[in-house]
Image (cartoon, helix red, strand yellow):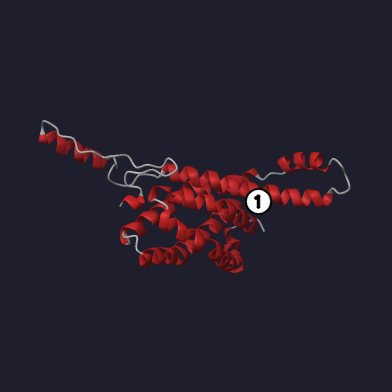
Amino acid sequence: MEALGGNGAFWGWKLPEIRNTKRPFPSKSKSSDSSAESTGSRGYRFPLKQAVTASSLALTGDTIAQLSSHWRKRKDSISGSSDTSKDIMPSIISDHDWLRALRMTSYGFLLYGPGSYAWYKYLDHCLPHQTPQNIMLKVLLNQIVLGPCVIGVVFAWNNLWLGKLSELPDKYQKDALPTLFYGFRFWIPVSLLNFWVVPLQARVAFMSVGSIFWNFYLSSTMSQ
């Protein structure tokens, strides 16, 4: 499907061309094909570009969340001074939670990037035609399947790093449903645009750009 990026490119994301070449010895051609399968060229390949993109933007969203939170707290504590910004910035940098930033970055690289890309490939395999019915069904499945999975995994990942797995059920009970329902208002229109006009290879990148705003909210929720 050309709509999914066939020979085109989107933001530099392009699938490599695979051309059939004639070989003088058929036996070597068969051997080459079997060798290609054993090396995984026709099997699973870790989506490195999607993983790097997701991790970079997860880090960006978390950084924005931390900086804005520190700024508000420091600004409230320092008032009536002409050198407010000079006093605030060093303390903001020194108070930055780098372990929290690493948690979000590793989540994007190891889980969200590869997982969401595999999910989008699966949806395109099951619903290959770009009809209005298929697009709406993809959006619906994205919200009722991927959405809860993302929230469940990111909360578990965060509590695992903090050594607070025993508190995970309370975290789910307190924040999971509000986060999910709040996300519907943001992700439904974003997902609609994603499935409608964005090629498969660029969907993780597009959704990760939206995740800058979402991760701002998600990181703030997880840190409470």
- Residue holding disc 1: 65
Give the side of residue 62 with respect to residue 106, left or right.
Answer: right
**Position in image of residue 20 (x %, y %):** 20, 38
Residue lying at the far top of the rendered structure: 24
Q: Quadrant of residue 164?
A: bottom right
Secondary structure at badge 1 equals: helix
The quadrant of the rendering that contains the C terminus is bottom right
**Position in image of residue 25 (x %, y %):** 10, 32
**Position in image of residue 105 (x %, y %):** 55, 46
Q: Is residue 99 visible?
A: yes
The residue at 34%/57% (across/down) is 124
Give the side of residue 40 with respect to residue 94, left or right.
Answer: left
The amino acid beneath tag 1 is Ala
**Position in image of residue 198 (x %, y %):** 42, 52
Residue lying at the far right of the rendered structure: 80
Q: Depth check: 98 or 125 in front?
A: 125
The residue at 50%/62% (across/down) is 189
